[in-house]
Image: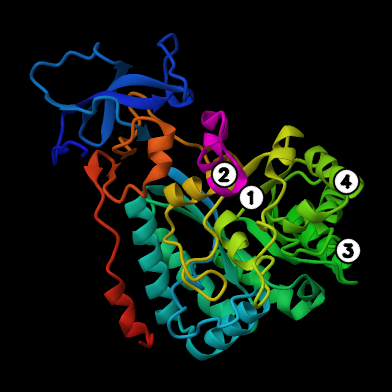
Amino acid sequence: MIPAIPDSGPFLLAGARLLAGHCPFRGEPVDRDGFVLVDLLIDGERFAAVAPAGTAAHPDVRRVDLAGRIALETFVDAHTHLDKAHIWRRTHNPTGDFWGALDAVTRDREAHWTAQDVAARMDFCLRTAYAHGSAAIRTHIDSVGPQTRISWPVLAEARERWKGRIALQAAPLFKIESALDAAHMGHVEAMLDAYGTGVLGAVTYMVPELGDGLAVLFALAERKGWDLDFHVDESADPEARSLRVIADMALARRFPGRILAGHCCSLSVQDEDEHKRAIEAAARANVSVVSLPMCNLFLQDRHAGRTPRWRGVTALHELSDAGVEVMIASDNVRDPFYAYGDLDMLEVWREGVRILHLDYPFARWAPVVREAPARAMGLALDGVRAGAPADLVLTDARDFTQLFARPHADRIVLRAGKRAPPPPDYAELEALGTVP
């Protein structure tokens, strides 16, 4: 059990186990999992000192002996859908597949997505993510028809309300063919100008309009100085090759912004030559890739009456070995695309380790839930150092296998030196028209 944490400082967290890469000093012994033991002095909202374990002697300060328990830095969740979350009970997906999910979300959006409904579910999500230890999130916002003008002001209000607690970014989500509709793009541009966070995106797949649609988005992003974030090849079809099309266009145009490609599932089922060409192009074009291990495991290779043969995830090891920035994220939460999840990046990391083999060494893959997504989002992180906000996720684990063996619902999340509240109660969602 994690020792009780004082309600106010100053207090000393003695003997915390911190990843060596997150430690502001060098020279201390590093254990086989890549951790060092440190003392953390917290005074008010900030770290007052970070020192090797046993060296921060403060006789007049309350001492909390962590005895080698792991202290993690807060998480960055680079791919979510806060506008879809928590609609499963009122509009579920009985087939469990991608096309059933698409149909269910369309029906729910047209019937229920008022500003009040979207705002309530989005706020529930942000409180949940905060309670679990996330400090930054990028969400995709369905930007189709009238919904575009409903959801973006809601997003902007949430971003302002959560400023200082969760850095909230957003990218529009629509079919790549819609980029060729001038009226649609006019609405999207207006919303991003008024309420956006400098990110443009779309769903890409192998349609005749792919090249022309991408050209429109690249040109707009170049003119505005925006980054790009695409849903890419979320399919088991080896002919789904839009990752390489995106990378080739970025290279040809010398695109100056950041590009994040989500899913890229079909990369894992392509022949070796195409697989290699796509990865090499992504590396040359500095395209980052985010895998969504839980949602893609759930959706991909789903056929009624047949056990899945494929995990549904992208070639994360090969991408990383080629120099591509890779990461993992939550994706959907309790909606027709994924009926589970809780915007808990520790769960995403734990399941990512199992699904994608992000282990041996564990520490090599730790950046996939913090540093890598932060770079893809253009965020500067404070980290654990004297003068930085005292943000930590304290666990009862002492090594990585303990960390990933349990869900750690008893974790203590410290934000600015104070314990974060617990996740909100699901009962709050009953007022949104869910059904038993």
Q: Which residue is drawn at 45% across and 12% down?
A: 26
Mark 3 nearby-residue class (10 Å; few <14, some 14–19, many ≥20): some
Whole-Å distance between the Cαs marked 2 and 1? 8 Å
Residue highlighted by disc 1: 290
Label 3 vs 4, first from the N-terminus: 3
Dots 1 and 3: beta carbons under 8 Å?
no
Please state which of the two labelled residues, at mark 1 or mark 3, is closer to the viewer.
1
Q: Position of residue 279 (x, y in %)?
A: 81, 43
Kind of residue sitting beneath label 4: Glu
Q: Give the residues drawn in magenta, as a range.
A: 354-370
Please state which of the two labelled residues, at mark 4 or mark 2, is closer to the viewer.
4
The disc at residue 272 is: 4
Kind of residue sitting beneath label 2: Pro
Outermost residue toward the left in this view: 60
Q: Where is residue 152 in the image (x, y as percent from the top left)?
A: 53, 71
Whole-Å distance between the Cαs marked 2 and 3? 27 Å
Please state which of the two labelled residues, at mark 2 or mark 1, is closer to the viewer.
1
Q: Which of 281 and 91 is in front in this view?
A: 91
